[in-house]
Image: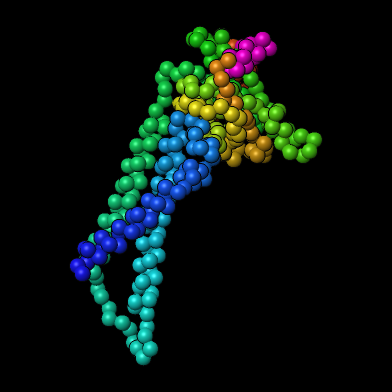
Amino acid sequence: MPVKRRLRWVALPVGIGAAVALAGCSPTQLHGFLPGFTEDGQAATNRTDMVAGLWVNSWIVLLAVGIVTWGLMLWAMIAYRRRRGQTGLPTQLRYNMPIEIFYTVVPLILVVGFFAFTARDQTVLETQNQNPDVSIIAIGKQWAWDFQYNGKAADQSDAVWSMGVQAQVAKNGDVDTAALPTLYLPVDKSVRIKLESRDVIHSFWIIDFLYKKDMYIGQDNSWSFTPTREGTYAGKCAELCGEYHSAMLFNVKVVSDAEYEQHLTELRDAGQTGAITQAYDRLDNLPGTGATTNEDGK
């Protein structure tokens, strides 16, 4: 039987078996057991599926490469093992052009492919919405979070804000999640979050959203997405930022429009209006300049 026909007969059952196996997977398994999905596969944001797809498909390719590599290693160990009665060294080959071309071209294709898919998805993920439904500033500080909900005024006089403290311990010894800083987001509304730091490098990570971005002094980042499922999600700082880094936690509540507006009204009624000014900065001087940020200039 010709070699090509044999390969077809081998590939056919392997392909059918793989299709059947994948068809029997649950949404949780198809998403690589990542957080951010319900049991029926509903994603937390409009970008969560994209990140999960890049992750899972990368692992599938890497696993296939691993199987081929391990298989060739095992085959070489068995086929070219020393037999009983053999002495000396086996026949030495100086080179094998087809094999050398194979292990040069295939890794190159894999690297280029990984780069292309990653660059494609990263371009989408990093594209910022210039006209979002909701504009928010998230400020990281040692070791908590402040959230400012921007309004329409250029000077942010109609903005409202909430300020948080680091995680507190409840009576049972666990973290008091009810006392954590909480970011409110309206479901199915486009959001752009501007990320700022008051002191050291922090990293804004909403775990179920499958994405995080770093926060630097003097270099503000932004993150645009649309929450697609109501619920409460956990967030934390993902950059070692000091002694109480582990206590730098926050909650995210994705709620209806009515609940979101109610929260903004509560902040406004509490007098938490206007922009969060530099009076709350932890640093006394601008980095490396010696200039002060105090209003009196001292």
Q: Position of residue 49 (x, y in %)?
A: 44, 36
Q: In the image, is residue 257 above or below residue 111?
A: above
Judge whether residue 198 can be spotted in this image: no
Q: Residue at 30%, 59% (x, y): give it.
A: 11
Residue 129 on the magenta segment: no
The main secondary structure of the magenta stretch is helix
Q: In the image, is residue 72 above or below residue 260?
A: below
For this rendering, which residue is in front, 52 or 115? 52
The stretch in magenta equals: 259-273
Q: In the image, is residue 248 above or below residue 133?
A: below
Q: Residue at 56%, 9% (x, y): give it.
A: 158
Q: Position of residue 152 (x, y in %)?
A: 50, 10
Q: Position of residue 254 (x, y in %)?
A: 57, 25
Q: Residue at 52%, 23% (x, y): give it.
A: 187
For this rendering, which residue is in front, 20 or 83? 20
Quadrant of the frame with the C terminus: top right
Q: Position of residue 268 (x, y in %)?
A: 63, 11
Quadrant of the frame with the N terminus: bottom left
Is 184 on the left or on the right of 177, as rendered? Answer: left
Q: Quadrant of residue 132?
A: top left
Q: Residue at 63%, 26% (x, y): give it.
A: 182
For this rendering, which residue is in front, 265 or 232? 232
Q: In the image, is residue 31 above or below residue 155?
A: below
Judge whether residue 251 can be spotted in this image: yes
Q: Quadrant of residue 248?
A: top right
